[in-house]
Structures are given as C-alpha cells and as structure tokens.
Amino acid sequence: MYDFNYHRPKSIDEALSALTSASDGKLMGGGQTLLPTLKMRLASPSDVVDLGAISDLKGISDQGGAIVIGAGTTHAEVASNAAVKSKIPALAALADGIGDPQVRNRGTLGGSIANNDPAADYPAALLGLGASVKTNKRDIAADDFFTGMFETALADDEIVVSVSFPVPEKASYAKFPNPASRYAVVGVLASKGPAGVRVAVTGAGQGGVFRVAAMESALDGNFSAEALAGISVPSGDLNADIHASAEYRAHLVGVMAKRAVEAAG
Ligand SMILES: Cc1cc2nc3c(=O)[nH]c(=O)nc-3n(C[C@H](O)[C@H](O)[C@H](O)COP(=O)(O)OP(=O)(O)OC[C@H]3O[C@@H](n4cnc5c(N)ncnc54)[C@H](O)[C@@H]3O)c2cc1C
C-alpha cells in the first residue's frame, strides 16, 4: 500500500471539500473493493475520504410507495430491515446473498453501485426495480446510471447520497453464484410494478448490467415463467472467463429469469 492522507468527514459538504481539494482524492464506503485495490498497489490516491461517519448517508426510510436507502447503509442492514423485508423482499434477499458476513457488514449500497462491478448484485436491483439514484448534485434514473463495465454516470466530484426503490407488485432475484466469492455468475431480477415489467441481468454482460427487452415484452400481460419459453439472449455480447463460457452464461440467463419470475409469483 502506498501512503495517502486519510479524512473522516462528518458531513457531505466536508467530504466534497476534502475530495475536491486533493490532487487525486478517492471516496471510501465500506472499503471492500477500494482497500484490496490499494493493498495490491493497483491504485495510489493522494487522499482517501472515508464516508463512514456521515449520518446523512445512512438509514432506510419507508416512504409509502418507495423505500429510500442511504448510500452508506450496509448490505447486512438492508437484508435485515423490516420495511425492506415486508415491502421489497426480493431486495432484502439480494442483499443477504452478497458475499459473506464480513462483506455484508462493511460493504455499502453506494460503494457497490459506484463501483459497478459487472458481477455485482445491486446493479440488477436498481435496474430491475426502476430505482432512482440521488447524488449531491441530481437524481439519476437507474436506466442512465450504469454506463459500462465499472463505469457510471457519476462525475468525479459526485457522491451517491441515497437510492429510492419503488415498491413493486411482485419481484424476485435469482442468482447463480460463484461458489467462492458469491458474486453473480449470472443473476436476474424480474419485477412488475410502477416502473413496468423489468428483467435485469447482472454477471453476464460485457458492458455490465442490462435489461432484456424481449423477456419484458413477453411478461407484459402474462407474468409467468411459461411466457419466457424460447426466449434467449445472444451469447456474442456476454462475458467468458474461467468461471463460465459465454454460451453457458446465455443459458443461465434463461434459467435464472424463469426462476425469478416463478418465485415472484
Ligand atoms: C470477498 C468478497 C466477496 C464479495 N461478494 C460480492 C457479491 O456476492 N455480490 C456483490 O454484489 N458484491 C460482492 N462484493 C463487493 C461488496 O459487495 C462491496 O460492497 C463492494 O465491493 C463495494 O462497496 P464498498 O462500500 O465496500 O465500497 P468501497 O470499496 O469503499 O468503494 C468502491 C468504489 O465506490 C466509490 N464509492 C464508495 N461510496 C461512494 C459514494 N457514496 N458515492 C460515490 N462513490 C462511492 C469508491 O470511491 C470506490 O471507487 C464482494 C467483496 C468481497 C471482498
């Protein structure tokens, strides 16, 4: 690890000031991705701005038609929250399936979506539920937030403050996890609700999370696993690595989509 200046601001304004006055500042949520990157000397920021003491970034609020979750909220807090479990159980289950207890107790919603790992679970939740991301500058629809593998619409001086998830009529997330890390080899979130019918896939796309329009059209009006019969995604745009070929991932997208729709009931 290289030397860096460490900041632990108490407000979003203080965090912004530390970030923008640094020559190469980096925000830190739970540090679950950032710290290994620093330890392996893959990054050498001049300043690390730890968001962990900012109370405005924490907490979960039930706003009737939507659940709003602060960016600094951990996966374990989302998984165990009564309002999330009752109104969007698919989201609680998704958070509960991330990594291991250590990762769930440190990793945050904001860090996960800002990082936009192509195998991360939360991007499927945001896109599959039609969520909206609030930053210190603006609101960004999930459809516009994830712009490519490890890429988002966030500017360098933009902090994720919270995410608003509209409460769906029905939703479920089905994941085929990597048995070691629990990252998604393929994960599919299918939902029907205020944001329409949505099918979002993580783990598979070369450009990160994506929606499957053909499945959404088939489910619109007939939200059943049978409606997905014969619909597949082309393997040409999918990831291939030591864990799974592109063809296998394409097959898994179909299987996971049917499981998600069946479980959403
Ligand atoms: C062993 C292991 C297993 C894992 N398994 C899974 C899994 O199964 N599924 C899964 O989805 N994830 C998994 N993860 C990732 C984990 O979920 C972390 O949440 C994720 O790495 C990033 O969250 P973090 O809060 O730790 O962010 P950090 O590591 O602190 O930051 C990540 C990036 O986000 C930026 N950032 C952080 N907070 C904000 C903010 N509020 N606004 C703007 N930018 C911000 C940072 O600058 C950095 O670039 C795993 C991680 C580990 C180490």
Image: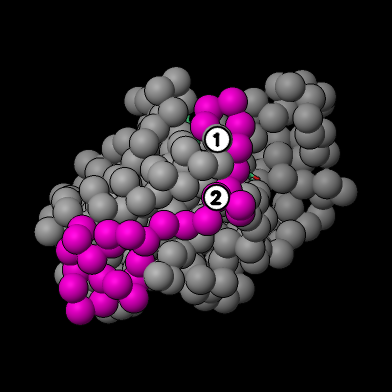
Q: What's the residue at 26%, 77% (across, down)?
A: 220
* Amino acid residing under circle 1: Ser
Q: Can residue 142 be seen from the camera position used here?
A: yes
Crowd rating for badge 1 (residues with CA inside 10 Å; few <14, some 14–19, many 20+): some
Looking at the image, residue 90 lies above or below residue 168: above
- For label 2, the SS is helix
Q: State whether the magenta stretch is mostly helix, strand or loop.
A: loop
Q: Is residue 256 left or right of residue 36?
A: left
Residue with the mark numbered 1? 245
Evaluate if marks 2 and 1 touch, with contact meaning CB atoms under 8 Å apart. yes
Return the x and y of residue 129 as percentages of the image width and height. Answer: 34, 65
- Residue bearing mark 2: 235
Relative to 143, does residue 14 appear above or below in the rendering? above
Say which residue appears at 61% left-offset and 54% top-offset.
Answer: 237
Is residue 227 rendered magenta in the image? yes
Q: SS class of the residue under badge 1?
A: loop
On the image, the x and y values in percent for residue 17 come to 72, 58
Q: What stretch is highlighted in magenta?
A: 215-244
**In which quadrant is the N terminus drawn?**
top right
- Within 8 Å of ligand 1, the CB of disc 1? no
Q: Which sits earlier in the primary sequence, circle 2 or circle 1? A: 2
- Seen at 55% across and 41% down, the residue is 246
Give the camera-side residue of 139 and 219: 219
Residue 198 belongs to magenta span: no
